[in-house]
Amino acid sequence: MKITGRTKVVGIFGDPVEHSISPFIHNASFEAMGLDYVYVPFRVRKDRLSHCVDAIRALDIKGVNVTIPHKEAIMAYLDELDHEAEEIGAVNTVVNTRGRLKGYNTDSQGYLNSLTEETGFNPTGKNIVVIGAGGAGRAVVYGLAKKKPRRLVIANRTPERAQALAREVSKKYTSTELVATGLNIKDYLGDCHLLVNATSVGMQGGKKGPVVSIEGLPEDAIVSDIVYKPLDTPLIAEAERLGLRVHRGLGMLVHQAALSFELWTGKRPSIDAMRFTAVQSMEAL
């Protein structure tokens, strides 16, 4: 990759960002498609977020991905929000157009694309449990709610946050039963078709053990974890021990990355090439 004064810069804002394989995925695609872009990871502390957003304009950075812990907080510093990002209340992609910053959310559709591609699961009429009501959890919940499941349980360490999200979603998707609870979800496991971890629990270097107990899930249930490093999180390992179908987080990463890539460049990258690069970079790190 040759970087010059004409090279367009994009990147990722997060804390931490050391684990991110997004630079590998995007830079390989830029090079393969002959695009004069470079993708850079930026570690952004919470107390410096506003200054770093100003730097996007000042340095003419063409856009950034946004990850933990900034997906909700960054909204206050943008000029405009895409409809879906506004509805979800979280941003994972920013596009800079001549100094005007617009926020998007590609997590929601990226998750659904990955879930469909890898499992064929159709959320319509199903019973679903989502763990997490933060930025990623909001994206997953809204994406699934659009598909009109029969019941959608939102479980969160702080039940009040789950309740607030459930109230929001219920106003827009009235055909789905919305339930908010803490992390004691055993009453909702017996007829659950899909359980999703949409928190960072299980991420490499984080807490050990599954985010919740999944004993009691039906044998045909799918257990999904948006964490991609490691690929086999404690939750995925427990699900496999119980003989359940699993959906790992790498697919969501790749599909949301492809949507972000297209927003920045106007070009559609190869999903297969991005996935191949992602797997290779996981093995290298």
Image (cartoon, rainbow, N blue to C red):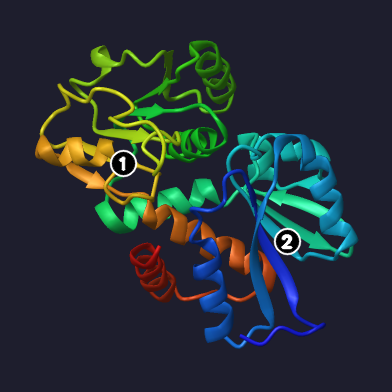
The image position of residue 96, as x and y in percent, is 80, 60
Q: Amino acid at mark 2?
A: Gly
Direction from residue 145 to residue 26 in the image, left or right: right
Residue type at mark 1: give it: Ser
Position of residue 254 measured from the top left corner of the image (x, y, whole percent): 45, 61
User: What residue sits right under mark 1 in the picture?
Assistant: 224
Quadrant housing the C terminus = bottom left
Is 25 in front, or is 86?
25
Closest to the observer, 99 or 188: 99
Residue 121, how many percent across, how many down?
28, 46
Mark drawn on residue 63 = 2
CA–CA distance in space, label 2 to label 1: 29 Å
Mark 2 or mark 1: name the one nearer the start of the chain.
2
Query: Judging from the image, what secondary structure is the residue with disc 2 in?
Result: strand
Which residue is depicted at the point 55% across and 22% down? 165
At 28% from the left and 48% from the top, the residue drawn is: 247
Label 2 CA crowd tier, 10 Å (few <14, some 14–19, many 20+): many
Circle 1 crowding by C-alpha within 10 Å: few under 14, some 14–19, many from 20: many
Viewer-nearest residue: 2 or 81: 2
Closest to the observer, 77 or 54: 54
| Direction from residue 139 to residue 195 in the image, left or right | left
Q: Answer above or below: position of 17 versus 280.
A: above
Please tell me whether mark 1 sits on a helix, a strand or a loop: strand
Contact, mark 2 vs mark 1 (Cβ under 8 Å): no
Rendered image: mark on residue 251: none
The number of callouts visible is 2
- Residue at (40% x, 27% y) in the render: 131
Question: In which quadrant of the rendered image does the N terminus lie?
Answer: bottom right
